[in-house]
Image (tube, helix red, strand yellow):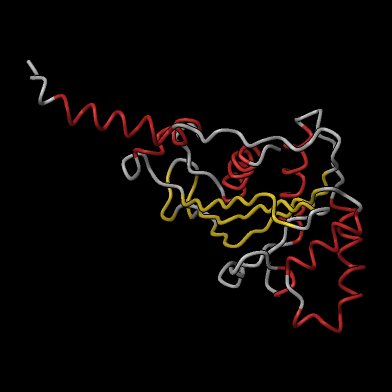
Amino acid sequence: MLSRFSLIPYLCCMILLLVGCAPKPAGTPLPSQSTLGVAGFHQPHQGWQMLSSTRADKSVTLASDMLEELDGMLADLLRAKEDRPFLGTEATRQCQELVLSRMRSEQAGVAGLRYWMEVGQCVQTDYLLIPQVLEWKEREGGEWGVTEPGMVVMELTLLDIQNRYVAARFQYDERQRSLSEDLLQADKFFRRGGKWLPAKELIRDGLREGLREMGL
């Protein structure tokens, strides 16, 4: 029979697991009458694209069709909230080209925050959501076994255009691990059915988590 003292390490482990698995609280929703614009997924290589100090230089370059697939993934998740209409990537992309052409002579010295704020003003939106892929490594193997797991680093930045500040930022840095490697991520392991996911599905997980934490 176990003594009460021998149970203490077991109980401590269970508490750590529960704390580690608990999701963060959902963020405060945007004001109901506000508008949301969404930029397309991209990999920031130039200073005027960057909203943090990290470039995507270490990552493989994603094909345009993969970036478009990620755009569709984000749009589907946003559409799931019927009370949150948004302006899609087509309008934002047109404004990106307009703003960039206007700033072309200044490109070397234009800060990313200024560039994206002007894009938001061009779109005429209250808030602008900017998704960026900073790192991407595809899994090597299949869903039931890998020699190298998938890994992604994604950043979501929400700008308040009218007040000209960063309203929220979410970074998702995920390298999939087995249950034995990381017991604190047991909830993810079981939610994924014990499968090793391709990188784009790791992005989907990150989008769900990020949109929830950002109140979107």
Quadrant assignment for the C terminus: top right
Q: Position of residue 70 (x, y in %)?
A: 71, 49
Question: Residue 186: which quarter of the image?
Answer: top left
Residue shown at 72% from the left, 61% from the top: 42
Q: Which of 5 and 60 lies nearest the eye of the viewer? A: 5
Of 65 and 133, which appears nearest the observer? 133
Residue 80 located left or right of residue 52:
right
Quarter of the image with the N terminus in it: top left
**Is 177 left or right of 116, judged from the image as shown?**
left
Q: Please identify the quarter of the rendering in which residue 56 is found.
A: bottom right
Residue that sits furthest to the front in the current view: 163
Query: Picture coordinates of residue 36 (x, y %)?
Result: 82, 44
Vertical arrangement, residue 74 with respect to residue 169, above or below: above
Q: In x, y percent, where is residue 93?
A: 87, 59
Q: Residue at x 15, y 24 (%)?
A: 7
- 105 left or right of 3? right
| Number of marks | 0
- Tell which of 163 and 55 is nearer to you: 163
Residue in the picture at 71% in, 75% down? 46
Residue 185 position, x and y percent, is 41, 38
